[in-house]
Image (cartoon, rainbow, N blue to C red):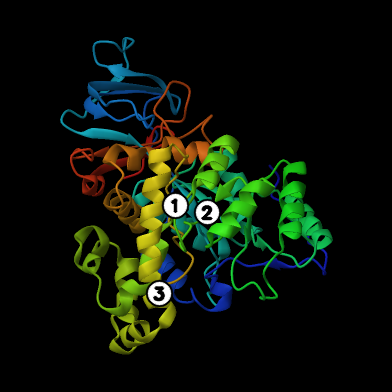
C-alpha cells in the first residue's frame, strides 16, 4: 500500500481517537516512552533455516498443545510444526533446543493505539517506533491500531511491509470517522480510503440527544461506503441497542464490550450469522477507575522493568489524582460496567461468537502498551474463559477478526514465524504469559 496522504474535504468531520495526545491526554507519556525505549538497529540475521525442538507448542488454533514439539522455520516463515518425531529436519539446519519451554504465537492486539505527541521534539517516526518496540518487548507482535495520526503511521506501516520488522507489525485506521449526515459520512470514508488505511474506526455512543451521536441512517451509510472501498469497520460503542443496530447495518467488529445490560439471543445469533468480531477491551474499563489507589501491578517486576512505565507512575500515584478518580462519577460507574462486560464476554464465548483480544492500550495515560495485553488475558480468564480460549483470542481469533489470518495468528506452515517462547505453561496459569524467554518476528529473535 502507498503511504501517500490525501487530505479530506474541509466539510468532512474526522475525529481523533479517544485519548489522543492531541487532546492533551497523552502528553508526556510518549516523551517518557521515547526517552526510555532504545530503538533497535539492524540485528544479526539467524540462519535462513532453523528448528526449535523440545517445547510444548500451542499453535493458536485451539487444538491441544503439541508436547515435545518442533517448529521448522525457513526464510522467516513456518515450514513445519508437529512433534519432534513427525517433523523431518533437513541436514544442516540449525537446531535450537527449547526443551521444557512453551511456544505460543505472537500476540495480536485487535484494538490498540499508537499516537504522536505534538508537543514533543522527538521525530514522529521515532515516537511510533518506540511504541511498537514497547509492544513487542511484551510479546505483542502485531498491533491493529484503531486510532492514529493516519499519515506517519501509514508511511511506517508501508516501510515495514517492504522489509522485515524488528518490532511489532503495524496496521492502521488513521483518525476516527464520525459525521452528522450520510453524505458527509461517505466523504469521510473516501478520504480515509485515499490515505490507504487498513480499517475504518468509528464511534456510536453517548446520550441520544448528543450532537456527535450518529443516527442509524448515517452510520449505515458510513459502513456501506467503507465496504464499497473494501474497508472493514470497527466501532466504539457501549449500549446494547447500538450494538444491535450496528450489527444490522453490517459493522465488522464491535471494538468494545456491551456494558449496559445482558446481551440477548437476537444479537448473539446475528453476530454469529454475520461473523462479527467482538473485542472486549476489559482493561479499558480497568484503567478508568484503578488509579483511585495504587494498583497492585505497580509492584509487578514484569511492569516495573520498563523505564518508560516507571517514569509515569508518579502522576498516577499522586494523592490528588487518586482523590479525583475516587470522586469521579464516571470512574465509579465504570466498575459496574466492567462487571457487565465480564458477564457478556462469558455469554458470547459460550455461544461461539468470535472473540479477539484488544485493550485500547495507548489511548491515554495509564493504558500500558505491552503490559495491559497480559492483564487483558488475565481478566478474560477471570471473566470465565479458559486459558486456552484467552490465548486463542489473542492469536488465531485476533487474526481472524482483523483478517490477518492468511499470514499471522497461528503456528502453521506458510505463515510468518511470529512467536513467543515462554519459561512456563500458560495453560496451567494464564499469568505464565509473563514468563517470557524470547520474542520472535518473521523468524528473527528480538530479545
Instruction: Write down the residue under mark 3.
Output: 333
Earlier-in-chain disc, 1 versus 2: 2
Which residue is more in the foreground, 362 or 376? Answer: 376
In front of the other: label 1 or label 3?
3
Q: CA distance from mark 1 to mark 3?
A: 21 Å
Assign the N terminus to one quadrant of the image.
Answer: top right
The answer to which image quadrant residue 52 occupies is top left
Q: Tell me: 247 left or right of 189.
A: left
Q: State yes or no: discs 1 and 2 in contact (Cβ < 8 Å).
A: yes
Q: Residues within 10 Å of mark 2 (few under 14, many from 20)?
A: many
Instruction: Write down the residue under mark 1.
Output: 358
Q: Is residue 10 above or below residue 417?
A: below
- Element at label 1: loop
Which residue is more in the foreground, 221 or 61? Answer: 221
Earlier-in-chain disc, 3 versus 2: 2
- Element at label 3: helix
Q: Residues within 10 Å of mark 1 (few under 14, many from 20)?
A: many
The answer to which image quadrant residue 372 occupies is bottom left
Q: CA distance from mark 1 to mark 2?
A: 8 Å
Q: Name the residue furthest front.
A: 265
Amino acid at each position: 500500500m502507498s503511504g501517500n496522504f490525501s487530505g479530506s474535504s474541509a466539510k468532512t468531520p474526522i475525529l481523533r481517537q479517544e485519548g489522543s495526545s492531541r487532546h492533551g491526554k497523552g502528553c508526556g507519556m510518549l516523551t517518557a516512552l521515547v526517552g526510555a525505549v532504545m530503538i533497535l538497529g539492524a540485528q544479526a540475521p539467524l540462519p535462513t533455516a532453523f528448528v526449535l525442538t523440545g517445547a510444548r507448542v500451542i499453535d493458536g488454533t485451539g487444538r491441544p498443545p503439541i508436547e515435545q514439539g518442533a517448529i521448522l522455520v525457513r526464510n522467516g516463515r513456518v515450514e513445519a510444526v508437529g512433534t519432534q518425531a513427525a517433523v523431518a529436519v533437513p541436514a544442516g539446519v540449525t537446531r535450537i533446543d527449547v526443551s521444557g519451554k512453551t511456544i505460543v504465537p505472537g500476540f495480536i492486539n485487535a484494538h490498540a493505539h499508537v499516537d504522536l505527541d505534538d508537543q514533543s521534539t522527538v521525530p514522529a517516526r521515532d515516537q511510533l517506533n518506540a511504541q511498537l518496540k514497547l509492544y513487542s518487548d511484551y510479546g505483542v507482535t502485531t498491533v491493529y491500531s484503531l486510532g492514529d495520526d493516519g499519515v506517519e503511521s501509514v508511511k511506517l506501516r508501508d516501510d515495514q511491509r517492504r522489509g522485515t520488522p524488528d518490532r511489532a507489525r503495524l496496521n492502521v485506521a488513521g483518525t476516527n470517522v464520525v459525521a452528522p449526515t450520510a453524505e458527509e459520512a461517505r466523504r469521510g470514508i473516501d478520504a480515509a480510503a485515499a490515505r490507504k488505511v487498513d480499517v475504518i474506526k468509528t464511534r456510536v455512543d453517548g446520550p441520544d440527544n448528543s450532537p456527535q451521536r450518529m443516527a442509524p441512517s448515517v452510520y449505515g451509510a458510513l459502513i456501506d461506503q467503507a465496504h464499497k472501498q473494501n474497508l472493514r469497520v470497527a466501532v466504539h460503542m457501549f449500549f446494547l441497542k447500538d450494538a444491535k443496530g450496528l450489527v444490522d447495518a453490517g459493522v465488522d467488529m464491535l471494538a468494545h464490550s456491551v456494558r449496559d445490560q445482558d446481551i440477548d439471543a437476537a444479537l448473539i445469533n446475528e453476530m454469529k450469522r454475520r461473523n462479527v468480531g467482538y473485542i472486549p477491551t476489559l482493561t479499558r474499563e480497568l484503567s478508568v477507575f484503578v488509579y483511585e489507589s495504587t494498583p497492585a501491578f505497580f509492584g509487578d517486576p514484569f511492569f516495573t522493568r520498563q523505564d518508560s512505565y516507571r517514569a509515569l507512575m508518579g502522576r498516577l500515584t499522586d494523592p490528588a489524582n487518586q482523590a479525583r478518580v475516587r470522586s469521579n462519577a464516571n470512574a465509579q460507574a465504570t466498575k459496574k460496567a466492567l462487571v457487565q462486560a465480564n458477564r457478556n464476554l462469558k455469554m458470547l464465548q459460550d455461544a461461539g461468537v468470535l472473540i479477539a483480544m484488544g485493550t485500547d492500550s495507548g489511548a491515554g495515560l495509564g493504558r500500558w502498551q505491552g503490559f495491559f495485553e497480559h492483564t487483558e488475558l488475565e481478566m478474560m480468564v477471570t471473566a470465565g474463559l479458559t486459558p486456552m480460549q484467552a490465548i486463542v483470542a489473542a492469536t488465531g481469533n485476533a487474526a481472524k477478526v482483523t483478517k490477518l489470518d492468511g499470514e499471522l495468528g497461528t503456528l502453521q506452515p506458510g505463515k510468518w514465524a511470529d512467536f513467543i517462547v515462554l519459561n512456563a505453561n500458560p495453560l496451567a496459569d494464564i499469568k505464565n504469559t509473563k514468563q517470557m524467554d524470547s520474542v520472535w518476528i518473521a523468524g528473527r529473535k528480538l530479545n
